[in-house]
Amino acid sequence: FKWLLIFLIIFSILFFINVKRNGGGLKGVLCTVLGQKVENVDALERINVLLLGISEDINKKLTDTIIVCSYDPKINNAFMISIPRDSYLPIACWSGRPENKITHAAMYGNDCMINTIQNYFDVNIDYYAKINFKGLVDLVNALGGITVEVPKKLCTDNSDRKGKICINIFI
């Protein structure tokens, strides 16, 4: 684990240096990731990336988080839109394309999910990334973790309606 952390730190430093060398900002990141020169990136069309957060059980393959990220290098503009997992859309890979929760498209593979989004939203997905919750925790921990300060205790009704549950967090 120690060597992985050292590798990530060195990689991050080199990545940051290359981003700065490529003009910084979103354009610098894109140049670095795609290995392109700035003038080549300026000629690119809009790039769309689908981010999928999947259930803890990777075998169920349901999506909990669906985000489309878009970057237009010509105007140096980026945005993200989150698609609620329970949105009813025509599922591209189902015969007759009946509507169902978009999360169910993921059970039939990445292509089904991508095609469902492309067809419904009339957008081309160029790349995608998928991670489960454990992978996200491992990624955050590998990058040094996150400190959360909670100044108040959190109380909520118990689900069996027999009082309250309180969480006191002291970090």
Image (cartoon, grey):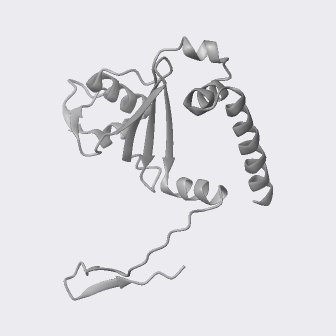
**Residue 163: x and y, percent?**
23, 88
Q: Nearer the viewer, residue 23 or 120?
A: 23
**Residue 60: x and y, percent?**
40, 49
Which quadrant of the figure contains the N terminus?
A: bottom right
Residue occupying the point 28% across, 44% down: 84
Does the rendering let one see residue 63? no
Left or right: 98, with 53 as reference point: left
Figure disc tally: 0
Q: Is residue 52 above or below residue 120?
A: below
Where is residue 97, by image quadrant? top left
Does the rendering let one see residue 11? yes
Which quadrant of the figure contains the C terminus?
A: bottom right
Residue occupying the point 37% across, 39% down: 106
Q: Nearer the viewer, residue 128 or 140?
A: 140
**Residue 5: x and y, percent?**
74, 55
**Residue 152: x and y, percent?**
38, 80
Where is residue 150, by image quadrant? bottom left
Left or right: 51, with 102 as reference point: right
Residue occupying the point 60% across, 62% down: 145
Left or right: 35, with 88 as reference point: right
Residue occupying the point 60% across, 53% down: 139
Where is residue 155, by image quadrant? bottom left
Q: Is residue 70 above or below residue 8?
A: above
Q: Is residue 39 above or below residue 121?
A: above
Left or right: 127, with 10 as reference point: left
Q: Nearer the viewer, residue 140 or 88?
A: 140
Q: Nearer the viewer, residue 124 or 116?
A: 124
